[in-house]
Amino acid sequence: MSVVEPLLRVRGLTKHFPVRTGFRSAGLVRAVDGLDFEVRPGETLGLVGESGCGKTTTGRMLVRLLEPTAGTIEFAGRDITHARRRALRPLRQDLQIIFQDPYASLNPRHTVGRIVAMPLQVNGIDPPGGVKQRVRELLELVGLNPEHYNRYPHEFSGGQRQRIGIARALALRPKLIVADEPVSALDVSIQAQVVNLLRDLQRDLGLAFVFIAHDLAVVRHFCQRVAVMYLGRIVEIGDRDDIYRSPRHPYTRALLSAIPDVGTLGPAGRIRLTGEVPTPLDPPSGCRFRTRCPKAREVCAREEPALVVHDGGRQATACHFPETGPLTLSRADAVGPGGAAVVGVADAAPPGDGADRVDGNAGEVAR
Ligand SMILES: Nc1ncnc2c1ncn2[C@@H]1O[C@H](COP(=O)(O)OP(=O)(O)O)[C@@H](O)[C@H]1O
Ligand code: SF4
Ligand SMILES: [Mg+2]
């Protein structure tokens, strides 16, 4: 149990999209299927998984751009799961989102000044010194020239446009920002600059982040905690260092193996992903990862593994046969946006005896 009250507390968060062919229901896309996690003030949680695993859907539910099918979202102690528009208004200030695509998320017909000022105007906020002054400060804060106030988005590069999106998200001085793959659309050379900017802002402004990424390289430098998603579920969650040093879920290991240049990851530790992610319209029974997991056994098809702490580890892992051999990052600093990780297998520990169930309450585990 943490002493600091969480800023965000998510329980059983679920989003099922009904799909139809013509007038007939063709089933449900189980995009997000029962997530439990918390984010404390000033903390960054990385939400990582392959494309289609439900990251964007999760992020959009958190900022209430999408209505959850089930579960609860508490923000600063308030249940906001189904808060209506008016009740959401003060909350909108505290909870912001940065989108993946800096091209699509800025109105091409509006000047940068107007784009960044929009949240202030929509919320009827007149900051000391005026809106224009505040926008100039924000542009400066994100490393843009405040004199470019009257320029249009097309006059900026991709990295600069993402900075505009960040300035807009900061305008209301939020407490939490959901950043949905904020650097995926950018050139590799620019990615590190934008991640560094976000990290500086996090440190200087005490912001909390849910930072969404499709690989583990980007979040390494930015997130204190990491949750790994697969097909709408969290399969592993824990402190960053634990996740990178001793990933226990075969999928987490596979994601680490996928970071380029993991040449020193021995055959015992390497798990290569084969095959496609199954459709969330009809996810596999039991463990959803079983169709791609080299360790899958009969029980994996029968029983869904709970997200629990195993064998005295610190992270919670949803696997019947979690890995026990620690990985050591021999060149941890080599991991970064566009960078490479060198992961070596330390002495493989003998397999453990099983899981310490934590009262069947994933919430206790998935802090
Ligand atoms: N509006 C929607 N209607 C039906 N299916 C959707 C909708 N939005 C997303 N999905 C599906 O939900 C799953 C998760 O999507 P998404 O959250 O965008 O994943 P990610 O961001 O991890 O790539 C995908 O299979 C996607 O096709
Ligand atoms: S529960 Fe079974 S199939 Fe799922 S990750 Fe663990 S070993 Fe693999
Ligand atoms: Mg996405």
Image: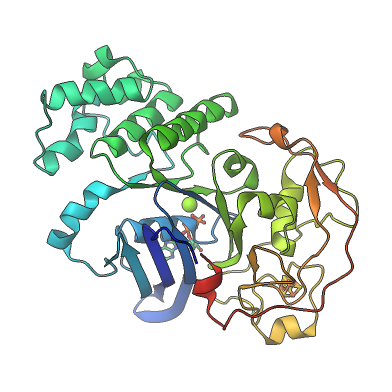
Instruction: Identify the residue at image location x=29%, y=69%.
Output: 81
* Image quadrant in which you'd find residue 15: bottom left
**Left-right relation of 17 to 170:** right
Q: Is residue 14 left or right of residue 152?
A: right
Could one spot residue 311 in this view of the protein? Answer: yes
Q: Is residue 280 visible?
A: no
| Residue 283 lies in quadrant | bottom right
Q: Nearer the viewer, residue 91 or 63?
A: 91
Determine the residue located farthest toward the top in the rendered image: 147
Q: Position of residue 132 (x, y in %)?
A: 15, 22
Question: What colouring style does the render use?
Answer: rainbow
Viewer-closest of 258 and 222 = 222
- Residue 143, percent from left and from top: 38, 20
The x and y percentages for residue 206 are 38, 40
In depth, the one of 320 and 290 nearer the eye is 320
Q: Give percent across and percent down for residue 10.
A: 41, 67
Tell me how many marks there are.
Answer: 0
Residue drawn at x 73%, y 47% is 258
Q: Residue lying furthest front in this view?
A: 3
- Is 328 situated left or right of 63 in this image? right
In this rendering, the answer to whether 347 lies above or below 140 is: below
- Residue 255, above or below 338: below
